[in-house]
């Protein structure tokens, strides 16, 4: 176990190193491997970058992101302008045919709804929209369309895990009920947990992933 003060300093150093983040405005507390980020960012992409930078630090087991977005006056937009920009991004998103995703904007807070076929499409939409000016927060409520689940979905996920890392795959248990995958076990780092979850989301027919993986 890395001491809390050491882990806190590592996170602060990583935030300071990341050119997308102004570390001076962000507070960090550490408790038994869990990191809480506070303070403010001047844009939503900066808030996101701070969270991703924290996940990269060895020894971080969980991240609670409480950073608020304080937009500079010159970057503030009316909700109608934000909605128009988001609609433009969605209209030209070639990775999502037959796009029925909608965005509701209130006081700079965006709620995304609709359906797509794959989890990676849902994540891609979020990554594209987060760069629209004026956004303070995003709630991604896009769901996945119901599709037939493969009879071999458990084996397909396990095979995908072994292709990425046989050692970590041996530490993960996969169970399937309907269109829901439950993951149990442990990994060494947060990014490894993300890789395991991505493998589960890539299986045809999976609409929900329950993450019970521990970072140890």
Image (cartoon, grey):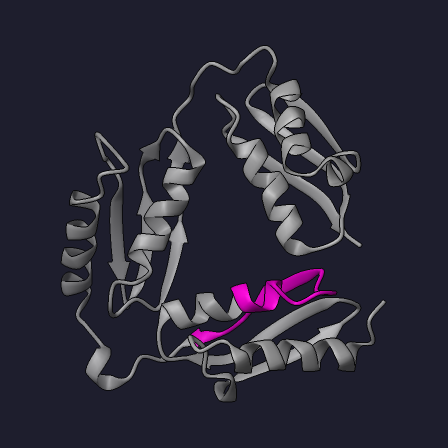
Residue 144's spot in the image, x, y percent?
41, 31
Residue at the spot 55% in from the left edge and 22% down from the top edge: 179
> Is 7 left or right of 200, judged from the image as shown?
right
The front one of 109 and 168 is 168
Is residue 215 depicted above or below 169 in this figure? below
**Which image quadrant: the C terminus?**
bottom right
The front one of 123 and 16 is 16
Question: Splitting the image into 4 quarters, where does residue 4 fall?
Answer: bottom right
Q: Is residue 112 visible?
A: yes
**Residue reaching furthest bottom?**
24
Is residue 103 depicted above or below 136 in this figure? above
Is residue 110 depicted above or below 47 in this figure? above
**Residue reaching furthest right?**
1
Residue 87's spot in the image, x, y percent?
17, 50
* Residues in magenta, as a range: 52-68
Residue 51: within the magenta? no
Residue 53: within the magenta? yes
Residue at the spot 36% in from the left edge and 51% down from the top edge: 126
> Is 63 left or right of 135, judged from the image as shown?
right
Residue at the spot 45% in from the left edge and 83% down from the top edge: 22
Q: Is residue 142 visible?
A: no
Residue at the spot 23% in from the left edge and 35% down from the top edge: 99
Question: Splitting the image into 4 quarters, where does residue 177 fall?
Answer: top right
Residue 81's spot in the image, x, y percent?
14, 64
Residue 173's spot in the image, x, y percent?
75, 31
**Residue reaching furthest top?**
151
């Amino acid at each position: 176990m890395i001491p809390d003060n050491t882990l806190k300093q590592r996170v602060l150093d990583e935030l300071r190193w990341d050119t997308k983040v102004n570390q001076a405005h962000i507070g960090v507390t550490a408790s038994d491997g869990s990191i809480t980020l506070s303070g403010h960012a001047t844009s939503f992409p900066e808030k996101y970058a701070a969270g991703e930078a924290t996940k990269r630090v060895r020894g971080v087991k969980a991240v609670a992101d409480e950073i608020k977005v304080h937009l500079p006056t010159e970057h503030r937009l009316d909700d109608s302008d934000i909605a128009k920009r988001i609609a433009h991004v969605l209209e030209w998103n070639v990775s999502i045919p037959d796009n029925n995703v909608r965005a509701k904007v209130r006081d700079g807070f965006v709620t995304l709804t609709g359906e797509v076929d794959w989890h990676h499409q849902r994540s891609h939409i979020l990554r594209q929209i987060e760069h629209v000016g004026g956004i303070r927060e995003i709630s991604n409520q896009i769901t996945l369309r119901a599709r037939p689940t493969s009879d071999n979905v458990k084996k397909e996920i396990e095979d995908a895990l072994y292709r990425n890392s046989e050692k970590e795959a041996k530490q993960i248990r996969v169970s399937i009920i309907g269109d829901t995958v439950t993951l149990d076990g442990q990994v060494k780092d947060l990014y490894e947990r993300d890789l395991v979850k991505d493998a589960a989301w890539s299986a045809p027919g999976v609409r929900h992933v329950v993450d019970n993986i521990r970072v140890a």
